[in-house]
Amino acid sequence: MKNYQRILKKSFIFSLLSLFLFAFLLFSGLAVNATSTCNADYQQNGVLTSVSLDYGLKYRSVTGSSRYTTTGTYVDQVCNYIEVPANEGLLITSWSNFQTDAWKMSRVNKVAENFEATHPGYRVIAITNGDFYDISGTGNFPYQPTGALVSDGNFYKTTPTRSNGYKLVSFTNDGTTNSLVSYDQSKITVNTLPTLTIYDENDHIIKEFDINKVNEDPSTGEIAVYFGTFTKKVYNPITTSSSANKCYVVENPIYCLPNSAKDFYGLGYIESSKSKSLLQGEFAICSNNSTIDQFLSEGVKIRVQYEWNGEASNVTNAINAGTQILVNGEAPSNVNTADGSRMNARHPRTAIGVKEDGTVVLMVNDGRQPETGRNGSYGNELAAMMKHYGCVNAFNLDGGGSSIMYYRDGENFVLGNKYSDPSERSISNCVVVAVKDPEIQVNFDRIGSRDVEVSVNVIDNNRHNLDKLYIRVGSKSELVVNGKATISGLTALEGYELQLSYELPNGNTISLPYNYPFGTKAREYRFNDINISLKDNNYIFELDYSDKANATTLAEAIIYINGKSYQMAEGKLTVGKEEIGLINEIKLEFTNQIYQGTETIILVNPHAPYLNALNEAIGSIETLLEEIFK
């Protein structure tokens, strides 16, 4: 008894000490289960919203608390983040709501709508603001991003104008763990001269040529590009070469972006071949090269752009970022000072990062709204947040009132955070996550009471790796082999949805946004035949079938004999021989119970061999009787 009391006493003392220790940690500002890096702590406290998006993307809005440890005080936070799994079927890129011949500021959801309008077949699943930009429009060519913007191999802006030490973030979109690659922008080198790209009528690249001169007369065997530039927002026209053998002018371009005298992007169709003074929004190729002239004429689509060389020569999708806030899982010691004063104060923040498995994380940390627990973060606190959500490398993007996130819910874009300005700010560029759904045709070959058989035809995979394509019904899934698959073990007269998914090389399963509703039939009946006999000058029709579930109306089926209908009773019918004569055709009509209703089944000559033999026998007997009684 005394031993038992001593045990109870020790247990009580241990519990009391544990309670005191927890209270000390809590009230001293030391977070339990906090993530720490570079004098900053962050912990998540609760979940406000959690939404599963298409193709395995996940959106979360969570509450938390963070502190810059030199201040010693925790503040409330709201973090909104989207996880994008590594998948070559997804396109992560940058975009702007361009005008034909100008950069334009737009709300983030309008940038998403513009991306879809200019990329037929693509759906934007998630989007955030991107790089810093000329927000006041004071630049020579206003509202440009401060850094570069490259999308799907198009170099809309190539020359970063950010400070050294800032990063260029590129998206490989190859489905590997190497999904996000960064470059020190000071090491990004731009080709001295632009490149001419020529397209065929199907929008495929057929030829590329180096351009030899910019706004200068081409020498023999050379080509030159001509475009006007801007000084203090005023357009400076330029006249094309009068000495060139040919001039090819794009007068109504798709895009004409003279970012500077050495940074130009032009895309459009050749409309004239006259030397002229170029108006704003026009550009031209002037040629003294007969080989290139063979590919150029009115109606041909061309592109002119500067491109990168060196280590970034293979980059096709990229955006500039600010300072790197996580390097190999930890924040740099100078994370709050590397970007001047920008990171050394509490502000709303937007960041992008990558996990070890290649998952890209887009984060918006709300700020400047302390009354609702949205305090914003220092650079090191933002690093702790990105580390908490699994990132090993992460980068700061534009913040403040520009920190805005949207995600797709059905046909609508949903605002994923609370911006800090009184109204939503218009921005210049965004990080976009988009997808082009694979084109797949599904046919139900057979729907039974307990199974379903389908044919699956992949018309266009649209970059998705569909080597391991599955059909799924509930928790049951089967691999599609040679375009066929069967799901068994279903319940009769039950409604189901057939879904498609595919397995990535890393083992992750991605559900496709397709649902094919169907319903199983009742327990299946079995129809054997119609027994027909002749007795007392009457035909007797009797059905041979099995219907244990009483799912059919076979017992009261309508039988058509030589086009005339009769009602069967208990699967039988007796009709005078003289009324029918020789039997030419029999049709049987009945219903079968299916999910949410019935189906009508019509059997034509369900027992034709037996019917032919009967008619032949009857015909022979009647011929014999006629011969006897002539």
Image: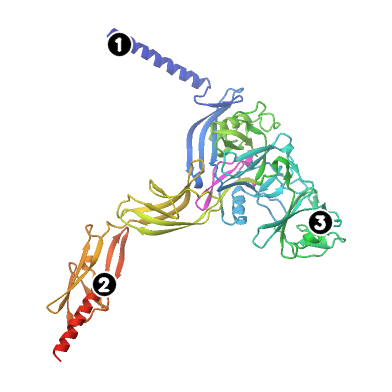
Q: Quadrant of the N terminus?
A: top left
Above or below residue 531? Residue 414 is above
Residue under label 1 = 4
Question: In the image, which is nearer the foreground, mark 1 or mark 2?
Answer: 2
Q: How many marks?
A: 3
Read off the residue under disc 2: 609
Mark 3 surroundings: few (<14), some (14-19) or many (≥20) residues within 10 A: many
Residue at 45 percent across and 51 percent down: it is 500
Instruction: Kindly check if marks 1 and 2 are in contact, taking CB atoms under 8 A apart as contact.
Output: no
- On the image, the x and y values in percent for residue 25 come to 50, 20
Tag 2 secondary structure:
helix
Q: Looking at the image, is mark 1 or mark 2 earlier in the sequence?
A: 1
- Mark 1 lies on a secondary structure that is helix
Cα separation, mark 1 vs mark 3, equals 98 Å
Q: In this view, does 298 lie above or below 258?
A: below
Disc 2 crowd, CA 10 A, few/some/many (<14, 14-19, 20+): few
x and y percentages locating residue 409 in the rendered image: 50, 49
- The earlier-in-sequence mark between 2 and 3 is 3
Q: What residue type is labelled 2?
A: Pro
Amino acid residing under circle 1: Tyr
- Alpha carbon separation for disc pair 2 and 3: 82 Å
Q: Quadrant of the C terminus?
A: bottom left
Q: Which three-letter amino acid code belongs to the residue tagged 3?
A: Ile
Magenta stretch, residue numbers: 399-426
Residue 425 within the magenta-colored segment of the rendering: yes
- Of callouts 1 and 3, which one flags the residue occurring earlier in the amino acid sequence? 1
Residue depicted at 22% across the width and 63% down the height: 545
